């Protein structure tokens, strides 16, 4: 059995797209040396969409350029799909960059190249080079998807700011990179095309396992994020698997025991939950044991059964979002029933102290829960 | 199926028409300057050596002190007679040369002109425009040939007109094409007897050898017996000696030689300026290419491609313009202004390498570019 950290998923057989350890970076040297990054540890897995936020000057962009092999590493380690960036040669950097799609704040399109030519230039990086026909077709499809069908033969001078930005986004996506690094990609886009871009990001993440790392302040795209990383003053201030976090909060809110607890408290509570996986038929709670934990099912199913003098009685089945184990904690009594995993199940657990702390903070809640169980019992 | 090759360099050149026009004119300008310098350089040298290049014989005998062809050191005909007497020698041709006054029939002014005289039956020079008939005319006493490319100062003549040379009457029997040089304005050719007689001192002696003999040993034998005051050499050697003399001793050769180097330098600067501006204007774009994973080779290729194309599209109008200017110059100066394949090829190579070198200078900026600056 393995105990999982809440903010890092089971990584035994997945090579992370990005694994940064103790990354430090400073500009200048000697007296004028200014450290802009320190103690940055970040692991991002294939298929994740990560949104990086933080005030300007917090080092987001510097970290992004380090991850994208645009800048030489100074201290620490960043592994891009298992390949170390520290002390990598220029050649290695060029090779790595081919697997990364960059979207810059400024589109930087060649004035002399039409939208479709811009994409075809990028496709020359593929090995082997595609034929002209195939390249043309592929580029045309992507541009059409981004709403540039009528304008694919236009040069930048005849495109609006948003259209240019979409060409730049298409350029970053055309070679199906393993990682997409984007700096404010949707800033210049209207609602609809911003949405299309995010859709494509999601598609690439789901279907191709691409990792998407977006630096943005655009609230419209926050709900696409699997993980939100907040940077302050050169280090990662918070790093939350936001989708999972929101799901837990949702579950907690649905729990009768926490029905009157304020959202902010639940939010903190969600951070204290520890995840654990159970195999089929594994006993989660043994009837008669001392209660130490509160359980919340993330996914899977469990059976609750009572053993009355050798006769096993099936009480109920609980699925995702369901919880159990609160009574023994509240009443300081042994477990009244056994809980057995029916299938491979992942459960968040909260230890007794933390659980009681929350309850204690809202005394009415404790009473109410007790009353409820008294009545029903 | 064609493979995917998008030429950024080419597209950038063609994109901005105004800049392309400027760039093309810039390069063309440099090309024209180079052609002019080379043209003058060769024109002056060739014109100095023009008579040497026309010699139709195996060997030339001249006086040792006649270090260039505009000097007047003559020698006695006996020396040529001695050479003619040697085995292997077929023929010796005496050449007389004088500076004479030719009266301009329109203005009555007398202008100095060079007169060459020789036994007409020996046909010592390959003269353009001269037919068998014309050679026959020279046998008639008083007939002369006039170099049609002489400068205009001598006036207008028709064939058959009377010419007054050093107050004596002569008759114009035909035209030849030789061309003046920077010292002499024109040339006349006449038969021995019409001008100078056998026994007079020679400016040159031409020697023709028998066929089917060991030329090297014959020449050696002639050299061994030759008077210490004389030199013997092939017409090519004479022409080269003349050009070498002009290049080294006359400032004119050096002036245009330096001009050639300067124009090459100017061309490089113009070309560099063009490429450098293009590179500077597109710096973020080049940085983006780098950030996308294009290696230095691709960037070098892009800029060098641009430089190479620029050299070609600049060279062609430059060449065309030079043709025009050569014609005008040849007309005005009567110097030999000729394009040779070699000179066209050399100037093209110079233009090409000039552009590539400029490209190399401009490229260094791109190679040093840090893509991290983009963010």
Image (cartoon, coloured by chain):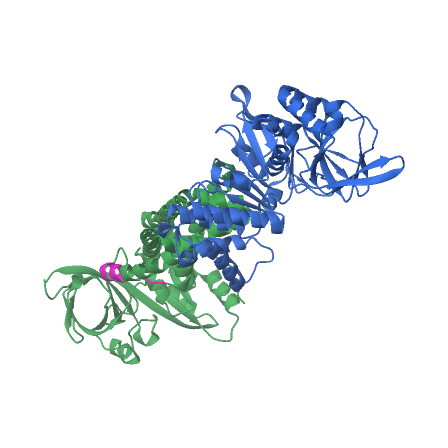
Chain colours: A blue, B green
**Is B169 positioned to the left or the right of B3 in the image?**
left
**Above or below for A331 versus B23:** above
Q: Residue A341: x percent and y percent?
A: 78, 41
**Above or below for A73 versus B7:** above
The quarter of the picture where residue B174 lies is bottom left
What is the span of residues highlighted in magenta in the rendered image? B327-339
Name which residue lies at 51% across and 42% down. B367
Q: Residue most toward the left?
A: B107
* Viewer-closest of A103 and B122: A103
* Viewer-closest of A134 and B291: A134
Name which residue lies at 12% across and 60% down. B109
Membership of B328 in magenta stretch: yes
Q: Residue A366: x percent and y percent?
A: 66, 23
* Viewer-closest of B233 and B308: B308
**Is B133 positioned to the left or the right of A269 in the image?**
left
Q: Residue A44: x percent and y percent?
A: 63, 38
Membership of B334 in magenta stretch: yes
* Viewer-closest of B315 and A323: A323
């Amino acid at each position: 059995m393995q105990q999982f950290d809440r903010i890092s998923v089971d990584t035994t057989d997945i090579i992370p797209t990005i694994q940064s350890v103790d990354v430090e970076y400073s500009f200048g040297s000697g007296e004028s040396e200014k450290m802009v990054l320190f103690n940055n540890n970040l692991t991002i897995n294939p298929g994740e969409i990560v949104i990086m936020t933080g005030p300007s000057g917090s080092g987001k962009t510097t970290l992004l350029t380090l991850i994208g092999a645009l800048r030489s590493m100074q201290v620490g380690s960043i592994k891009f799909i298992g390949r170390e960036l520290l002390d990598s040669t220029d050649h290695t950097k060029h090779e790595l960059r081919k697997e990364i799609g960059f979207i810059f704040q400024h589109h930087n399109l060649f004035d002399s190249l039409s939208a479709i030519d811009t994409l075809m230039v990028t496709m020359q990086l593929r090995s082997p080079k595609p034929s002209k026909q195939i390249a043309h077709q592929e580029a045309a499809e992507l541009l059409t998807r981004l709403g540039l069908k009528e304008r694919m033969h236009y040069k930048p001078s005849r495109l609006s700011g948003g259209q240019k930005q979409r060409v730049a986004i298409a350029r970053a996506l055309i070679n199906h990179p393993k990682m997409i690094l984007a700096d404010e990609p949707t800033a210049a886009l209207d609602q609809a095309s911003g949405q299309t871009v995010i859709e494509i990001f999601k598609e690439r993440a789901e279907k191709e396992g691409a990792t998407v790392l977006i630096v943005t302040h655009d609230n419209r795209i926050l709900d696409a994020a699997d993980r939100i990383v907040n940077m302050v003053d050169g280090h990662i201030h918070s790093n939350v698997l936001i989708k999972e976090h929101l799901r837990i909060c949702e579950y907690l809110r649905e729990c009768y025991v926490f029905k009157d607890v304020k959202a902010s408290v639940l939010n903190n509570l969600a951070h204290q939950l520890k995840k654990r996986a159970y195999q089929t038929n594994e006993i989660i709670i043994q009837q008669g044991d001392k209660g130490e934990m509160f359980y919340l099912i993330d996914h899977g199913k469990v059976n609750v059964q009572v053993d009355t003098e050798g006769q096993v009685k099936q009480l109920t089945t609980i699925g995702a979002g369901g919880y159990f184990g609160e009574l023994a904690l509240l009443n300081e009594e042994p477990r009244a029933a056994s809980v057995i995993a029916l299938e491979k199940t992942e459960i968040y657990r909260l230890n007794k102290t933390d659980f009681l702390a929350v309850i204690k903070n809202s005394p009415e809640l404790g009473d109410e829960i007790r009353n409820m169980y008294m009545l029903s019992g | 199926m064609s493979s995917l090759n998008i030429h950024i360099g080419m597209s950038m050149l063609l994109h901005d028409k105004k800049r392309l026009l400027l760039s093309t004119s810039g390069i063309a300008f440099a090309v024209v300057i180079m052609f002019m310098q080379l043209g003058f350089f060769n024109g002056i040298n060739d014109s100095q050596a023009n008579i040497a290049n026309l010699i139709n014989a195996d060997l030339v005998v001249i006086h040792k002190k006649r270090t260039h062809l505009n000097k007047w050191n003559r020698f006695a005909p006996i020396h040529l007679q001695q050479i003619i007497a040697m085995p292997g020698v077929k023929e010796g041709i005496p050449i007389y040369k004088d500076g004479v006054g030719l009266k301009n029939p329109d203005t009555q002014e007398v202008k100095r002109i060079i007169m060459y005289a020789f036994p007409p039956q020996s046909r010592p020079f390959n003269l353009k425009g001269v037919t068998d008939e014309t050679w026959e005319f020279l046998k008639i006493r008083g007939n002369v040939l006039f170099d049609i490319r002489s400068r205009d100062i001598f006036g207008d003549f028709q064939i058959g007109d009377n010419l007054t040379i050093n107050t004596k009457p002569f008759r114009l029997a035909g035209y030849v094409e030789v061309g003046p040089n920077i010292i002499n304005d024109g040339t006349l050719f006449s038969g021995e007897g019409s001008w100078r007689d056998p026994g007079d001192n020679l400016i040159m002696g031409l020697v023709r050898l028998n066929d089917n003999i060991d030329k090297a040993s014959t020449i050696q034998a002639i050299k061994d017996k030759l008077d210490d005051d004389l030199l013997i050499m092939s017409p090519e050697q004479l022409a080269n000696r003349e050009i070498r003399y002009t290049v080294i001793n006359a400032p004119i050769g050096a002036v245009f030689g330096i001009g050639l180097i300067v124009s090459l330098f100017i061309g490089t600067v113009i070309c560099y300026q063009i490429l450098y501006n293009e590179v500077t204007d597109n710096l973020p774009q080049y940085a983006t290419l780098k950030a996308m994973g294009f290696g230095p080779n691709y960037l070098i290729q892009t800029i060098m491609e641009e430089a190479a194309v620029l050299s070609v599209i600049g060279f062609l109008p430059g060449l065309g313009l030079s043709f025009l200017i050569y014609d005008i110059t040849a007309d005005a100066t009567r110097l030999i202004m000729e394009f040779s394949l070699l000179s066209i090829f050399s100037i093209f190579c110079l233009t090409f390498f000039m552009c590539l070198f400029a490209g190399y200078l401009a490229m260094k900026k791109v190679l040093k570019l840090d893509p991290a600056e983009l963010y």
